[in-house]
Image (cartoon, grey):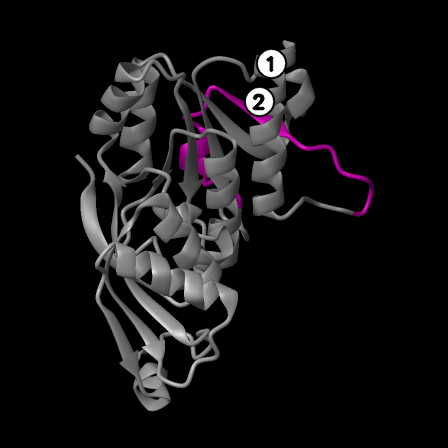
Amino acid sequence: MPRTKFIQIESKNAILELLQEGKSFEKIYTAMNAHKDPKTMEIMRIASSKRIPIEKSSRKFLDRLSKTSNYESVIALMIADNMWSLDELLTRVHEKGMQPFFLLMDHLKYDLNIGAIMRTAFASGVNGVITPIKSENFLTHESLRVSMGAAARIPIVEMNLFAAINEMKKEGIKIVGLHMEGKEYYKTDLRGPIAIVLGAEDVGISTRVLERVDETISIPMREGIGSLNVGASAAVICYEKLKQEVAGF
């Protein structure tokens, strides 16, 4: 079953989308003199209907509570329950009759990229995102804000990537690395059970992980451009897979 973490969210868009999704919240703080715009009013309406505690607070209190100093008069403490083990997630995928489709993030660093990838992953039907075990929380306010809440909705697995790759290979899942020297992505069959490996923004996929993939794919670039942002690259590959599943290879 999913493990629970508590995440502070400071984006109205993310809070509203997560409330509409049915996520649970420990408490929602709002500024006493906040302008009651439509989003704030809808957040308060849904929270009240779900009996989520709403605490009106001073701006000074919210300033101290905020982790970004860029909150929008509303701060929410969400109960995140989307942390899974790979074994449990694979069992869930099989029980629901879904085709395994995963993203492996090889030490991505920036919340903006992580958030963008998480939203693409959720939108394109990825079953789960696998990331190395970290001391800091993979779910942050910024990744939740950029993903507009999708980072709290898609299953996340924190584990050693080598172990994850080995386990998935035993399940018949093809491991494909996104690498500048790989075969053009549109010339590669991405249909069927698959896990796409995305490398870190500065160094790409580590050598040790690259040695364990079944094949590599690339996105062709015009001369003078080395690569796309990893978030944009993830979107290209995820939707190429969806296209191939529908239209064939």
Residue 205 image position (x, y, % from top left): 49, 40
- Whether the residues at callouts 1 and 2 have beta carbons within 8 Å, the answer is yes
| Residue at (32% x, 37% y) in the render | 155
Position in image of residue 228 (x %, y %): 66, 45
Q: Is residue 227 above or below residue 45?
A: above
**Is 40 above or below relative to 200?**
below
Q: Quadrant of the N terminus?
A: top left
The front one of 34 and 75 is 34
Relative to residue 169, is residue 206 drawn left or right? right
Q: Number of numbered discs present?
A: 2
Q: Secondary structure at mark 2?
A: helix
Indicate which disc residue 246 carries.
Answer: 1
Rendered location of residue 103, percent (x, y): 44, 33
CA neighbours of label 1 inside 10 A, class few (<14), some (14 to 19), many (20+): few
Query: Which stretch is magenta?
Result: 204-224
Please tell me which residue lies in front, 7 or 16: 16
Q: Position of residue 225 (x, y in %)?
A: 76, 46
- At x 37%, y 39%, the residue is 154
Q: Secondary structure at mark 1?
A: helix
- Location of residue 244 by image quarter: top right
Q: Which mark is residue 242?
A: 2
Q: Quadrant of residue 16?
A: bottom left
| Residue 36 in view | yes
Magenta stretch, main secondary structure class: loop
Please say whether residue 130 is one of the residues in the magenta stretch.
no
Instruction: Using the rendered image of the protein, determine whether residue 249 is visible from the camera's viewpoint.
Output: no
Inspect the magenta stretch and tell me whether residue 207 lies in it.
Answer: yes
